[in-house]
């Protein structure tokens, strides 16, 4: 049985280990992943007086981790940027329209706390789109659900750090690179949004497993990117063998970047996100893409079932200003991994909305 993954907010230290070699084995071109005439994921952030799309103080679902204004963030410019793709317009997020399109459906996020971040944003966007909505929330310790009752739309979050299973055995907790028992629950959803990566490099006391099982080998440890790559391949074959694309739509949230090191964006090594109030205006990110992005692209290209890739990495790399830093209700001294809500994850959902409306 899959273990209950508790969504600890242990500091996500995203130091990209030296994986350039691994990444360079895989070409980065997106191929059939982005059939649209315009690349929605390349562009720039522009000031927009009409932003933010809602008042985060009025959203009853906003978690303490992400509610930056409530916890004292003084600057508000970070709320006023709209993503503007090169050469085309992103449709404005229309929550009422999305609720209508999703009437009677179950939408499930599966992943780590960056997935929770997007889930939180979607709850606020949908809630604030229609005044006086009736909702019904539940949380059974694993699965969180909010039902928008007027539309009978269920929006759910299923925590999974690694997508593959952690199983408690006699020797300890085993991270099984080729097993996805959690998938039984996911199959109940009409729309699935997956992510994973941030926990793969985690070591020390917050690492939630003791051994890795790779095929019939039980290991104390292995190269984390290689492990990530194998787990993602397991997830890909699960999607290919279990999902019926006529009834279930699958999204994959790309790697969300952190901003602990100023030199990554051409700033001073002393800078972290906490000193930043504006996005970077650049057509490439100085530190380049995270090497694991190539593994995500490679994996998605090997799949036979369609997956919408939310390629959020570059546009999020530019948003060194959009993290909570110390302005959160859970006493993180400097969170440069997650994102304020309202804020950047609203754009991730806007990109998901664009994929939903472009279908027909
Ligand atoms: C975005 O487009 C610009 C201009 O065409 C290009 O130089 C840059 O490499 C692209 N960036 C990404 C992340 O695709
Ligand atoms: C970003 O830079 C481009 C040219 O380098 C400039 O035209 C544009 O106004 C800048 N945008 C912002 C928001 O500063
Ligand atoms: C709401 O939707 C669920 C499927 O998500 C369905 O089983 C249920 O019957 C619907 N309830 C109503 C009142 O329409
Ligand atoms: C909320 O939803 C649950 C599960 O569908 C149901 O059992 C419960 O009665 C609902 N509560 C309210 C107040 O409607
Ligand atoms: C919560 O609900 C999910 C989905 O129905 C189920 O798989 C899981 O076992 C439940 N967890 C608990 C602790 O009851």
Image (spheres, grey):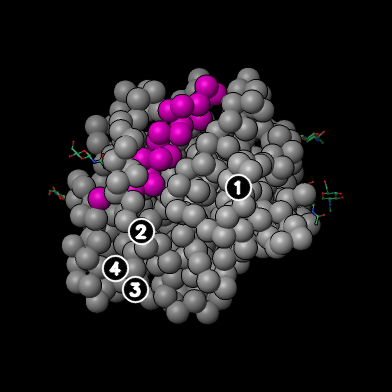
Name the spot of residue 246 as percent of width and height, x first. 63, 20
Q: Nearer the viewer, mark 3 or mark 1?
A: 1
Circle 2 or circle 4, nearest the eye: 2
Are the residues tagged 4 and 1 within 8 Å (C-beta)? no
Q: Kindly identify the residue that appears in the image at 33 percent across and 51 percent down.
A: 19
Q: Secondary structure at mark 2?
A: loop
The residue tagged 1 is: 217
Residue 299 located within the stretch drawn in magenta? yes
| First in sequence: mark 4 vs mark 1 | 1
Q: Which residue is mark 2?
A: 17
Q: Quadrant of residue 81?
A: bottom left
Is 275 situated above or below 191? below
Q: How crowded is the residue under tag 4: few (<14 C-alpha within 10 Å), some, or many (20+)?
A: some
Q: Residue sitting at 27 percent across and 58 percent down? A: 279
Looking at the image, in which quadrant does ligand 3 appear? Answer: top right
Which stretch is magenta?
288-307
Mark 2 or 4, nearer chain start: 2
Mark 2 vs mark 1: which is more N-terminal?
A: 2
Image disc number at residue 274: 3
Q: Is mark 1 within 8 Å of ligand 5?
A: no
Residue 261 circle label = 4
Q: Earlier in the sequence, mark 4 or mark 3?
A: 4
């Amino acid at each position: 049985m899959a273990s209950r993954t508790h969504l600890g907010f242990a500091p996500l230290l995203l130091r990209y280990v030296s994986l350039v070699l691994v990444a360079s084995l895989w070409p980065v071109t997106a191929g059939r992943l982005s059939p649209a005439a315009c690349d929605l994921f390349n562009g720039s952030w522009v000031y927009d007086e009409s932003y933010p799309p809602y008042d985060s103080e009025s959203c009853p679902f906003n978690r303490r981790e992400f509610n930056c204004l409530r916890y004292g963030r003084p600057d508000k410019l970070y709320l006023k940027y709209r993503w503007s793709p090169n050469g085309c317009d992103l449709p404005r997020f229309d929550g009422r329209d999305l609720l209508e399109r999703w009437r009677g459906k179950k939408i499930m996020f599966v992943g780590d706390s960056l997935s929770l971040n997007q889930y939180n944003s979607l709850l606020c966007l949908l809630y604030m789109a229609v005044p006086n909505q009736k909702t019904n929330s539940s949380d059974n310790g694993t699965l969180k659900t909010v039902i928008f009752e007027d539309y009978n739309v269920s929006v759910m979050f299923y925590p999974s750090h690694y997508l593959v299973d952690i199983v408690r055995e006699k020797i300890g907790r085993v991270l099984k690179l080729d097993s996805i028992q959690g998938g039984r629950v996911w199959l109940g959803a009409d729309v699935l949004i997956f992510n994973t990566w941030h926990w793969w490099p985690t070591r020390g006391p917050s690492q939630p497993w003791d051994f890795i099982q790779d095929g019939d080998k039980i290991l104390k440890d292995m190269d984390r990117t290689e492990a990530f790559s194998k787990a993602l391949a397991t997830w890909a074959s699960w999607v290919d063998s279990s999902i019926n694309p006529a009834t279930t739509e699958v999204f994959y949230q790309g790697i969300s970047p952190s901003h602990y090191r100023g030199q990554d964006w051409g700033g001073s090594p002393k800078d972290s996100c906490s000193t930043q109030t504006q996005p970077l205006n650049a057509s490439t990110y100085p530190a380049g893409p995270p090497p694991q992005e190539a593994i995500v692209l490679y994996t998605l290209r090997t799949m036979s079932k369609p997956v919408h890739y939310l390629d959020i990495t570059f546009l999020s790399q530019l948003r060194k200003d959009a993290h909570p830093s110390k302005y959160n209700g859970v006493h993180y001294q400097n969170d440069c991994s997650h994102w304020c809500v309202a804020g950047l994850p609203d754009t991730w959902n806007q990109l998901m909305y664009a994929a939903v409306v472009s279908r027909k």
